[in-house]
Amino acid sequence: MSLTLDSKEVIDRRLWPDVAVTPDRPIRALVARRLVRRALKTLPLRVTTADGRQFGAGGPNDPSLHLVRPDAFYQRLGAGGLIGFGESFMAGDWVADDVVGVLTVLARRLEKLVPPLLQRFRGLAVHARPGADRNTVDGARENIHRHYDLSNELFSLFLDPTMTYSSALFDANRPYDEQDLAEAQQRKADRLLDIAGVRAGSRVVEIGTGWGELAIRAAARGAQVTTTTISHEQAQLARQRIADAGYADRVDVREQDYRDVTGEYDALISVEMIEAVGSDYWPEYFQTIERLLAPGGRAALQAITMPHDRMLASAHTYTWILKYIFPGGQIPSVTAVTEHSQRAGLRVSTRFAFGADYAETLRRWRARFEECADEVDRLGFDSIFRKMWSLYLAYSEAGFRSGYLDVVGFELTKPGSR
């Protein structure tokens, strides 16, 4: 069953039920309209409408958001908050030439967009996380399946040849436009392997295989690698890539939950895995790291982070990203990583942040994804999916450009000696 909107776009209600139908919440829509008008008095942002109206404090060089269907926009925003804001973009209620610019402005002022008095009633306006999204062993497998098992071909369209789906680490002494993304991804992998002390003869375990690039580079150093994933699609392609690289005898790819991994290892690597674990399971995640490391062993973690107060404030909030992109996810803070590591008996030896590099990584992914619209269509994904994915990449890039998000590499050490 489909619904045709004013823009002539057809939205499949079976796939996108909350995008195809505009909610009817007139009181909330009125509140949303007033909040938007209030916020725009101080934001460096312009809003235009189809009838030529323009409002906002932004000047001609500031980002501009165009309301295609203002009434539908405010209805969705009033009914769903930031979820409704994202669904409104998917439905075509608003557009922007510079989506990242618009979202960066909003991310920088996120805490001040709602008046303090109304923030007291935040719990009545936001949606709670569904219990079904909790990362139990079965729940985690389903959550991972909904994102990482979409299609290996889809990810290959916008990732670089290393098939690395995490932030690259660029050379700080050279301009971004002079650097290759694949080389920056390999630099990141090598930095993490160095932190964990991976060398010839090392016993290495990786939590979160991805598509195998880090395992390949560890094996190239002469290490014996065990790598785990609960994504069937990733495991299949990782095995093929590892075999093609000539390291099938040094890398064991397991379709196994991290909680079920056994053995003792000199080094552990986990790249942007903690965000998929869920805060309820962070204690078990770090206890698993401690259990798998031999005395004196080292772990290298790469994690997206957010300020601790914002992490606490949003811990139980259901967001657009959780609904459509990463069900069950939770971004930690540096404080959370440090405290959970220490409680598990691990020491945070060093850490380094490179959030600006993630913004650049996401910019390149989004540009490539949007250039491949026809190929995405041929894979069976519709225009609403493409809008959703473009917004996800832009939303993430804006988070790093605004400083609301960061990405941090951690070295964790287990007491003892090898």
Image (cartoon, helix red, strand yellow):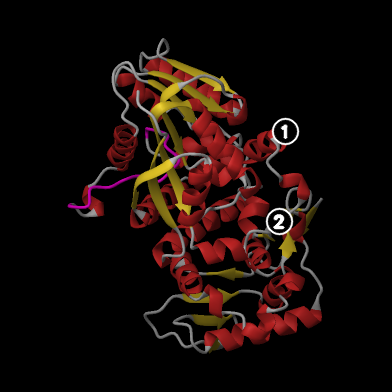
Q: Is 308 part of what is drawn in magenta?
A: no
Pick the residue in front: 335 or 158. Answer: 335
Q: Residues within 10 Å of mark 2 (few under 14, many from 20)?
A: some
Amino acid carrying label 1: it is Asp
Q: CA distance from mark 2 to mark 1?
A: 35 Å
Dividing the picture into quarters, in which one does residue 403 lie?
A: bottom left
Q: Secondary structure at mark 1?
A: helix
Mark drawn on residue 138: 1
Of labels 2 and 1, the one closer to you: 1
Location of residue 245 (image quadrant): top left
Q: Which residue is mark 2?
A: 10
Q: Is residue 320 left or right of residue 415?
A: right
Q: Residues within 10 Å of mark 1 (few under 14, many from 20)?
A: few
Where does residue 252 sit, x and y in percent of width and height? 48, 16
Residue drawn 45% across the image and 54% down it: 334
Q: Which comes before the other along the chain, label 2 or label 1?
A: 2
Residue 308 versus residue 205 in the image, above or below: below
Which percent across, then down, holds residue 68? 61, 74
Magenta segment main secondary structure: loop
Q: Which residue in the rendered view is the most extreme toward the top? A: 249
Is residue 51 visible from the viewing direction of this image?
Answer: no
Q: Secondary structure at mark 2?
A: strand
- Nearer to me, 40 or 212: 212
Which of these two is toward me, 289 or 251? 289
Q: Amino acid at mark 2?
A: Val
Residue range in magenta is 161-173
- The front one of 46 and 317 is 317
- Label 1 near label 2: C-beta < 8 Å? no
Quarter of the picture holding the C terminus: top left
